[in-house]
Image (tube, helix red, strand yellow):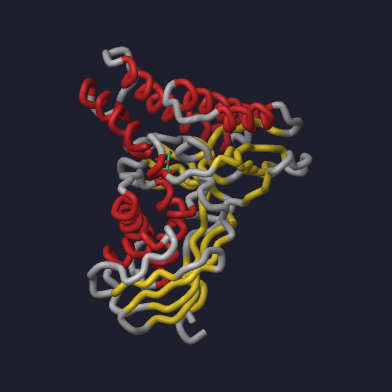
Amino acid sequence: MIRAFAPGRVNLIGDHTDHQGGLVLPIAIDRGTTVTGKSGGDRVRLRSDDEEGQVEVRVGGGPPLALGPEWGRYVSAIVELERPARGFEGNVSTTLPLGDGLSSSAALELAVALALGFEGSPLELARLCQRSEYLAVGVPCGIMDQLASAAGVADHALLIDCHDTSINLVPMPEGVDVLIVDSGQRRSLEGTAYNQRLVECARAAEEVGPLRLLPEVGGIIDPVARRRARHVVSEIVRVRAFADALLASDTQAAGELMLESHESMRTDFEVSTPRLDATVEDLAATPGVYGARLTGAGFGGSVVALAAHGAALPDGAIRVRASAAARVTSEPGD
Ligand code: GLA
């Protein structure tokens, strides 16, 4: 039996910066997706614990034989890009809520790629899976989700420079909990204005060059492009400051930066929703919570908060821990 597990991620701060080569600060979490099964044959055949239907794809190429549930598109894209030597028959299960902004699609991509025998560095794995997301759903996402899942380290956040993909580990301070609250608004990236935001950022970059290198956005004439760029530029500054705050165990400062980040996503990048805003406001007013913000792409999904360890868990919140990277947990024959 082969068992491959890939964690989801929650981004503490630094959203909509990865596609501009900026900084992000995610953690891999202690929830994720597992693919279990046996390799062999010339087809990849997978079922899910949670959904009806079956996915069946030929390993040598050609159109999928059965795409079954929606998640089959990701499997098919991985098979096409990875070109495994052999097929696989097995099962997918997940402890991640789907469509909640915790990177359930990246976790599926990585778990499938590893189950099919991917051999390579975490960065190569992340790149393959990032390309598969584009192939599967046409969204040219950044590298954050896949790299966080591929390179996660227990009890550490990952300060990733998405331009050169270098990673600095930032220890999570003692006595701090990471909380996630589902806004209740499901979504998947292809149904959002994610691609439109990329176009708007590209328009800004056409005027002034790469946004990650920009000290300020005054030179951008197009008002929408200027606001999008202002989010990217200010968010990169906040990521650095937030990493410093974690290193200094300055949880108050970290919390304030999260609230500022949310405000910037709401007003300048316009990816929040009234439900996300209300969830952030409720959390911010909760005793023991240092700060909160929407996490991931926005348009729905989840809110992340930092809170004092042991404080009462707000309604609907779950606690997550910074966790280790995607891995094959048992070798064939185990
Ligand atoms: C999604 C994408 C990531 C990133 C975030 C926003 O999760 O997959 O690459 O752009 O949105 O930070």
**Height in image: 40 above or below 106?**
below
Looking at the image, which residue is at 32% across and 56% down? 132
In the image shown, does 17 or 35 lie closer to the viewer? 35
Looking at the image, which residue is at 42% across and 78% down? 89
**Which quadrant of the frame does ligand 1 lie within?**
top left
**Height in image: 144 above or below 222?**
below
Residue 86 percent coordinates (x, y): 32, 79
Residue 75 lies in quadrant: bottom left
Residue 283 lies in quadrant: top right
Residue 40 lies in quadrant: bottom left
In the image shown, does 192 or 125 lie closer to the viewer? 192
- Relative to 129, 69 lies left or right: right
Q: So how many labels did they put on this image?
A: 0
Q: Residue furthest left?
A: 206
Residue 328 percent coordinates (x, y): 47, 71
**Height in image: 282 above or below 103?**
above
